[in-house]
Image (cartoon, grey):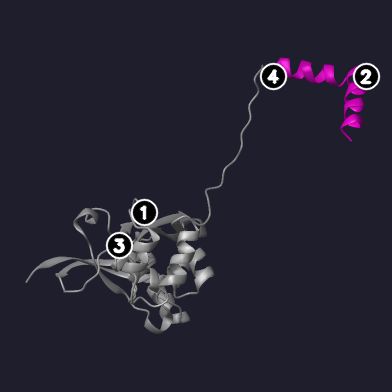
């Protein structure tokens, strides 16, 4: 029996009706960083759409056939400790929310990411070749129309707006046929707060002297005249 590191994930895309900790395989390149309390991206559902999640637990286990691997780790270290995970599990039972919703209620809003899917026409694929490879894929034509009209690259949200919510399913079918490729990126929903700082370029005495000069009667008239010209 082949063993592997298995993690249990609270997945953001899981609605309450099917919400539970989902098992995922930790690939070798993520063994050091995929620890409980960090956020990750995972494939979810039949279409394997990229979704955000958070690791609740990690244990060695049997490597089952069909077990999906983690895609990436979003944090350098855990953003939720053991007590926080226990609180999220309690919140789910107490308030009938999903595990991921419970985690979001605990952590600051600035930590969360927005997952972006950008779809591209495969390299070397022109429209004629794309149409030939897409034979038999339902509603492939309007999706390809929108993708080529966008210059061969577009975000999933743009394609869904043009072709409907099933655009993602069509794109994944086209991906299997070698027509399209997907690039996934995680972007912070709220940026870090920044503060602009200024400092004197001269000494405090020189600054005070300049201020006194500008407050003189002649300096004041020039200031008023400038303000009048400026409107």
Mark 1–mark 4 CB contact (< 8 Å): no
Q: Is residue 211 magenta?
A: yes
Q: Which residue is mark 2?
A: 217
Who comes first in sequence, dot 1 or dot 3? 3
Mark 4–mark 3 CB contact (< 8 Å): no
Residue 202 badge: none
Under tag 4, what secondary structure? helix
Work out how far the residue at label 2 is from the one at label 1, CA to CA, in angstroms.
60 Å
- State which quarter of the image contains the C terminus: top right
Who comes first in sequence, dot 3 or dot 2? 3
Q: Which residue is mark 4?
A: 204
Query: Which picture quadrant has residue 5?
Result: bottom left
The residue drawn where x is 40% and y is 84% is 17
Under tag 2, what secondary structure? helix
Q: Which residue is mark 1?
A: 75
Who comes first in sequence, dot 4 or dot 3? 3
In this picture, is 223 found above or below 28?
A: above
Question: Which mark's residue is nearer the viewer, 2 or 4?
Answer: 2
Any part of residue 106 in sight: no
Question: Which mark's residue is nearer the viewer, 2 or 1?
Answer: 1
Q: Which residue is mark 3?
A: 36
Magenta range: 205-231
Query: Few, some or many C-alpha atoms within 10 Å of disc 1 (few <14, some 14-19, many ≥20)?
Result: some
Work out how far the residue at label 1 is from the one at label 3, CA to CA, in angstroms.
11 Å
In this picture, is 18 found above or below 119?
A: below
Who comes first in sequence, dot 2 or dot 1? 1
Work out how far the residue at label 2 is from the one at label 4, CA to CA, in angstroms.
23 Å
Under tag 1, what secondary structure? loop
The residue drawn where x is 90% and y is 30% is 229
Who comes first in sequence, dot 1 or dot 4? 1
Image position of 133 (left or right of 185): left
């Amino acid at each position: 029996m082949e063993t592997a590191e298995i993690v249990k994930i609270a997945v953001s895309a899981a609605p309450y009706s099917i919400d539970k900790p989902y098992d995922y395989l930790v690939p070798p390149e993520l063994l050091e960083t995929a620890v409980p309390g960090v956020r990750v991206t995972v494939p979810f559902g039949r279409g394997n759409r990229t979704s955000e999640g958070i690791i609740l637990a990690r244990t060695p286990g049997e490597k089952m056939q069909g077990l999906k691997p983690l895609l990436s780790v979003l944090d350098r270290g855990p953003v939720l400790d053991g007590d926080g995970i226990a609180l999220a599990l309690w919140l789910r039972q107490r308030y009938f929310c999903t595990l991921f919703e419970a985690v979001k209620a605990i952590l600051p809003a600035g930590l969360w990411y927005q997952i972006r899917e950008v779809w591209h026409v495969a390299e070397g694929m022109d429209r004629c070749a794309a149409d030939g490879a897409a034979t038999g894929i339902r509603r492939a034509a309007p999706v390809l129309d929108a993708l080529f009209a966008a210059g061969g690259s577009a975000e999933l949200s743009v394609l869904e707006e043009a072709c409907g919510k099933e655009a993602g399913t069509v794109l994944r079918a086209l991906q299997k046929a070698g027509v399209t490729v997907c690039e996934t990126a995680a972007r912070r929903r709220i940026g870090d707060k920044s503060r602009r700082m200024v400092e004197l370029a001269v000494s405090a005495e020189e600054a005070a002297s300049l201020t006194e000069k500008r407050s003189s009667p002649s300096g004041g008239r020039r200031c008023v005249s400038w303000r009048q010209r400026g409107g």
